[in-house]
Image (cartoon, rainbow, N blue to C red):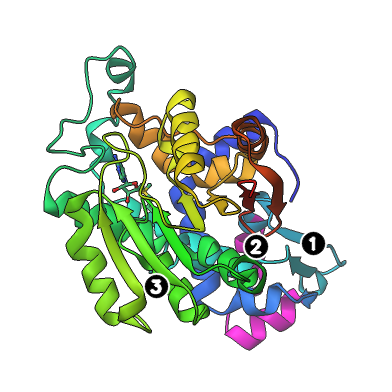
Amino acid sequence: MTEVSPRALMSLLFNGAKAVDVLTTALDLGLLDELEPGPVRLADLAERHGLKPLRLYKFLDCVESLGLLRREDGDDIGDTQYRAVPGLREAVVAGLGPDAIERDRDRYPWRLLHGRLAGSLRGEVGMTDDDFAWPPRTDEQTASFESSMSLGLGPVLEVFHRYAGRLWSGRTRFLDVGGGAGTLAASVVADVPHVHADVYNLAAVGPLVEQTRTQCADPARLGFVAGDFFAEPLPGGYDTMAFVRVLHDWPADVARRLVESAYASLEPGGQLLICEEFRTPDRLAMQFFWSYFLIGVDSCVSRLREVSFYTTLLEKTGFDHVEVLPSAWELVVARRPA
Ligand SMILES: C[S@@+](CC[C@H](N)C(=O)[O-])C[C@H]1O[C@@H](n2cnc3c(N)ncnc32)[C@H](O)[C@@H]1O
């Protein structure tokens, strides 16, 4: 993808709804299936899909203006060759398709801020606890939030699955701290027959974890420990603990205290795993919704940090063997010395 100038970006932003229309149409018509492997001739594409070549040419200009298509002009427009950037089809499905995470996010009451951002920045407009409380207050808010979290867990499940052999060799007791409704714990239970996984979370989340437990591969190996990590030390008896998308919810000093609390509670020789969207320009962009929405929610810090913040913090806390395992979302692994 090429970078566009700020001026060009303004035109794209203003026409964002039309751009979404173009890309979903390209997906629905099956054009992306041919454009992505490419190269494909305009005349052939038009004929195979029953489309008018000149109209298709303008349509593909729209896709190209988004930086998503490469084009080689022929003398005749019919001879123009196209190839989409790698991964475009998958990205359109993930970002704009019927099950896109953005559609789930859209149901949150962001419109309360829309057009009133200046007032919000001055502190005059914000979310009430009825609109969105952090952490969630009511059972309904809890269920709704945890279901959104589970929807976005794909890259986390992927990295835990990918490194399962190495993570769980010689490890048997896993505590997923702030482990949502237990989706990750259930996935570990399914992947690794010798691990018992407990979810540590606020008591209100217990019924959701229970639902996950009854549907998981081995319910006897998935448990729930109700607790509040601000009110008590983390429970002991675990050789592995994880913070998945938990630390970025809190200011640096709180994140530090949570990591120290995990250090104190882990078995000697135990490991701490940290996984979330470590800050990169791409991930910040994909987090745009929450950055915007949480402007109105003072209790949630929402701070994507570079991975180096965590590796440094872990070393300062006393962990050793601090490693960053590569994946779509990296997994940070650190060991409490034996
Ligand atoms: C952003 S969610 C991440 C959930 C899950 N780890 C995931 O990635 O899908 C943060 C989690 O921290 C939990 N949490 C918030 N405050 C907590 C507290 N004081 N004690 C224990 N868990 C807490 C929330 O209930 C929620 O499950």
User: What kind of residue is marked 3?
Assistant: Ala
Is residue 158 shown above or below 135?
below
User: What kind of residue is marked 2?
Assistant: Leu
Asked if marks 1 and 2 touch (Cβ < 8 Å), the reply is yes
Q: Nearer the viewer, residue 155 or 216?
A: 216
Instruction: Give the farthest residue toward the right.
Output: 75
- Disc with the residue nearer the chain's start (2 vs 3): 2
Q: CA distance from mark 1 to mark 2?
A: 9 Å
Residue 118 horizontal side relative to residue 195, left or right: left
Residue marked by disc 2: 60
Q: Quadrant of residue 220?
A: bottom left
Q: CA distance from mark 2 to mark 3?
A: 44 Å
Is residue 137 shown above or below 242?
above
- Disc with the residue nearer the chain's start (1 vs 2): 2
User: What kind of residue is marked 1?
Assistant: Arg
Residue 277 horizontal side relative to residue 7, left or right: left
Whether residue 55 is visible: no
Q: Which of the two discs, 1 and 3, sits closer to the camera?
A: 3
Whether residue 143 is visible: yes
Residue marked by disc 1: 71
Magenta segment boundaries in residue numbering: 41-61
Instruction: Give the farthest residue toward the bottom.
Output: 48
Q: CA distance from mark 1 to mark 3?
A: 46 Å
Instruction: Give the farthest residue toward the top.
Output: 122
Q: Which of the two discs, 2 and 3, sits closer to the camera?
A: 3
- Tell me what residue is drawn at x 35 percent, y 28 percent: 295
Residue marked by disc 3: 186
- Residue 157 in percent (x, y) is at 51, 67
